[in-house]
Image (cartoon, grey):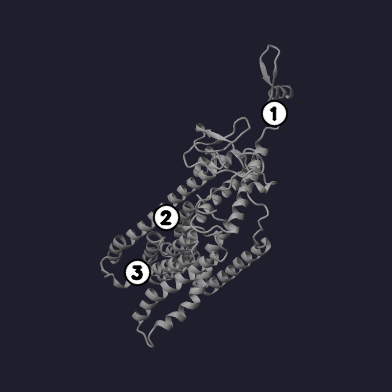
Amino acid sequence: MNRTDAPARTPAGAPGQQPGPLPPRGAPGPVRRDGQGPPGPDPRNDGYGYDVDRVDPRGPVRLGDARTPRVRRRRAWLQWLVWGGSILGLLLVAAGVYLFAIRPLGFGTSLVAFTAALVPVTIVLLAIWWLDRYTPQPRLTLVYAFIWGAAGSVGLTLFFGGFFTAWISPPEPEAITAEFLGAVIQAPVVEEFTKSLGLIALLCWGRRFIGGPIDGVVYAALIAGGFAFTENILYFGQSFHQAQAMGEVAVFWQTFYLRGLLSPFAHVSFTALCGLGLGIAAERRSLMLYFGLGIGGLSLGMVLHALWNGSAFFIEVDPADPLAGFLRYYLTVQVPIFVLLAAIAIWLRVRERRILRRQLSEYGRAGWFSPDEVTMLLSMRRRRKAEKWAGRHGALARMGMRDLIRAAVELALDRHSVLFGRPTRRSRMRERELLEIITADRRLIGALTAPVVREVTRPAADGAAAPAGRAASAVCA
């Protein structure tokens, strides 16, 4: 595929005949005339040539040259081995974080801090679910991203943070200087770098997981949400200890209010900028953009992180109302930044829908989807209705419908990305595989939802026609 390629289509004429060019967008599509001669225009199909035969998986030559050498693939067992080893290693790191950072707080304090930390992480996960559900990512990689943030990046930060602080600190720093360097320099640089390593690990597997801006934002938000979850446990635990020592529970509730309710998306906003840059680069398939936008997004995230942490040192505190100064800063600086980033996320969601409509319509004009199928694939409500309808015919039919939707969405997004770059053998083979998966799923659904007894009409005693299938049912009753 390239900028002038149309989606793969099946021949409109005799078997083996090469297909002609697709009609332009909005023009009438081809239609057969008694099975003879070239197809003519049909003004009724609104540009969709759905009379074109779909692919037969047993005859792959319909999708192009079947002699194209297959691209070497990673073995499935090796992929599962690597993913399993990665997640197991992260769980071991999580055990270390618990033993050396959380367990010293005490069981009761840790339980209180864990329960309080569930509130902001639930808010973050709900937002990520809304953002990702239109083009959902594999659950295994979503779990990996969260565990990397909650364990891997936290462990690396705890290990390298002290060395980095000692490196940037003067020989004998004052207490306020050491605190400033740790909060404004060390924390943004080390934390954002370790969180971005999880995104780089996903990119090492290619564009399968991060193929566009919204994918990068989703994985970055999950990593940041996991990191904030563990960090909140530590902060809430320390605050609970202080509240017990001072005999004032207000200390704990103030920390919960600031970190759990006012800023659940703070870390998400910082890391999402790096994910956004890497996602744009992945969509454009540009190595230079990987470095430029990746480093640019990471640097901007570090700056916003430093601005957030530095507010504690620059805001004047009124002893009569300690939170007044912070709330003014929060409303005038942080809220506009969050609203801007939220607007970007919503725009990416709308943009993704437009991409699906455009690319699926192109495949529809090639005969792969009917207009009703395109409409169904663009609507979450219609997708659920389609899965529910298939589910009435069994779990296998429901799985087939879900797999068809997933393959169609991936097909459209892959084609959109290929249009920005040069098509490769791998991209052509992936398109071929997805089209064959869609055809196989459609046939499976059709076989499972077709009636077992065909309804045929036969003359009744009074001269009226009665369905044979219903008559048989009446006899059996």
Label 3: which residue? Answer: 307
Residue kind at label 3, given as amino acid type: Leu
Q: Is residue 45 above or below residue 93?
A: above
Residue 345 marker: 2
Of 265 and 256, the residue lying toward us: 265
SS class, disc 1: loop
User: Which x, y percent locates residue 84?
Assistant: 63, 65
Q: Is residue 384 left or right of 307 when viewed as pictured?
A: right
Residue 30 marker: none
Question: Which dot, 3 or 2, sits closer to the camera?
Answer: 2
Q: Residue furthest bottom?
A: 171
Label 1: which residue? Answer: 454
Residue kind at label 1, given as amino acid type: Arg
The mark nearer the N terminus, 3 or 1, is 3
Question: Which dot, 3 or 1, sits closer to the camera?
Answer: 1
User: Which x, y percent locates residue 26?
Assistant: 46, 39
Q: Residue at x 45, y 54 (%)?
A: 127
Q: Residues within 10 Å of mark 3 (few under 14, many from 20)?
A: some
User: Which x, y percent locates residue 36?
Assistant: 63, 32
Of 295 and 25, the residue lying toward us: 25
